[in-house]
Image (cartoon, rainbow, N blue to C red):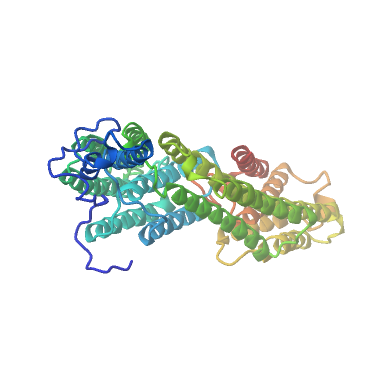
Amino acid sequence: MGHGKPLSWFASPLIEQDSTTLTPSSPISSCFPGHADSYSITSEKSRFNSPECGLHHTRSTCSKASTSSTESSHSYHSYDMPEFHRHGEATTAELFYDLFFVANLSTFTSMLEINDTSSLKAYVGFFSLLWLTWYQVTLYDVRFSADSVFERVAKASHFGVMVGFAVIGPTWKPYEAMEDFRLYKVFGIMLMVSRLTLFFQYCSTLWFVYAAGYRKCILPIVMVMSSTLFAAIIYISMTEAFPSLKEGIQAGRIVVVKQQSNVYIAWYVVGILETLFTIGVSTIWRVISFKGTHMVQRMSLLTLIILGEGIMVICKAISKIVKSDAVFTGSIVAQIIAAILVIYWYVEFLYMSYFDRLHEEHFGSIKQQIWSILHFPLHIMLVLVLQGISILVIYRQAVETLTRLDSSLDFVRSHQHNYTTAQAYGNALNETVYNYVFQHLPKGVDVLKQIGMVDEAVKLIVENAGHNGTMAKDVHGASVNETAANAFAKAQNELMTATIETLFSGLSVTVPDEDGTGTGAGTGAAAVPFEDMMQKYHDVFVLVITYVF
């Protein structure tokens, strides 16, 4: 920002009134229309004392004087409440703050996969805390922010809070049982810092309003300050509510016991209540409403940022398909086209048709505040829909590959009598799964465990396929014993389980762990039957369909 003079330590958010208009004896103005006391407006008084409105003057002359008196009356009523500086567009600091928001959203979206109801709730919960924190800061910025050293320090503090969101985002699984809640305690402190910063910013505004003589405007600002201070106290108090380290004895050893806590739910409750309280205060005391601010632009920019993040997520999904050397069949291409059309619909009909046709002058003070808070569910919907569409594109590709793999494996099994030895049959199975899945894995995907499972499964298949190495005699003959048959079937199951898990892991689709407290591929896969593994991926697909549509 360019300045013609040195940056002051503190800056008033008020527009300086013309001192020549009000006499020094004017009483303190009120924040409410219709509560004007006996202002003595010099220009108006001199106009009525003018001989132009004498008894012998024409009606037209007096009409002019009356018009001038009315104009002066409008000037009179403009002093009935304080006028705050308004920005026509977002400042540089506000835009940087929005960038921190999208960076957090991008990191969190890429790290946490929605594959069960617990992870879905965690995703919505984290986004809610992030959005409500952004919204609280934005409510102050659009109404009272004035460039000064103090405001820049406060903005740096808000940037630091956003960094705190980035730190905890990748590990945000509060529903899990864990050994140490230290990270969540630190996050509670970060939320406290955010609200305390807002408290001191409102203190600065209160000081300038009080110094300017707008005494009746003090109450709404004090009420908002009280809500931010109360929220800060709750956040810091909740850090002690999380469980401390607890030790126990397991297998004769002292270990740290995992514990579960629902304290984090209070964060959601406090965030929503303080936001509703702030909206309610600004609705009753309209002097601190959003009327005349650039709130519409801030909301449109954030909506555009969220749409952009959704486009990036879908493009990443397409790039994963490309990296896996997958064949783009007609159904895959149709799925991608459908995803692009959904994005186009949101951009064209939701964003352009909505925000481009939005006229701020048609907004009432109350309507605008309700309109702004309704963007909270709108943005949650956008994030979930675009995230879900990217998963559906990937899931379709996985199903296509799985269909071709299953067809090839059926061909190998149906021609097992053509293999002279069990080793040849095992090699054919190994080569098939390798050509369809393992050969096309993107870089950075850790499937060493699955590769080991496949090797072990092939080894068991070879060992239990036949006593003399011929499939025709032993697999279908009466001489095959029950133990060998069970081992053979188990090996086939583990081969398919490891292959399917690798296929979906290569496309970044995972299922919850056995205990339902986490996500990730490879946990306990050997003990999961093939049908159960497929059911888990089907459940993920059903969940995505549910929250998208």
The residue under the point 69% across, 60% down is 437
Q: Nearer the viewer, residue 16 or 284?
A: 16
Q: Nearer the viewer, residue 407 or 301?
A: 301
Q: Which image quarter holds the N terminus?
A: bottom left
Rendered location of residue 300, percent (x, y):
50, 50
Image vertical order of residue 448 relative to residue 112, above or below: below
Rendered location of residue 509, percent (x, y):
59, 51
Q: Viewed as shown, does residue 387 lie left or right of 91?
A: right
Q: Which image quarter holds the C terminus?
A: top right
Rendered location of residue 288, percent (x, y):
31, 40
Identity of the residue furthest to the left in this view = 25
Q: Viewed as shown, does residue 46 lie left or right of 300?
A: left
The residue under the point 63% across, 47% down is 349
Rendered location of residue 143, percent (x, y):
33, 47
Q: Viewed as shown, does residue 206 lie left or right of 316?
A: left
Q: Which corner quadrant of the image does residue 6 belong to?
A: bottom left
Number of marks present in the image shown:
0
The residue under the point 80% across, 49% down is 475
Q: Nearer the viewer, residue 220 or 236?
A: 220
Q: Nearer the viewer, residue 456 or 520?
A: 520
Instruction: Say whether residue 265 is visible.
Output: no
Instruction: Say whether residue 97 is visible.
Output: yes
Q: Viewed as shown, does residue 490 lie left or right of 63?
A: right
Image vertical order of residue 451 relative to residue 331, above or below: below
The residue under the point 55% across, 61% down is 446
Identity of the residue furthest to the front in this view = 56
Q: Which corner quadrant of the image does residue 280 belong to?
A: top left
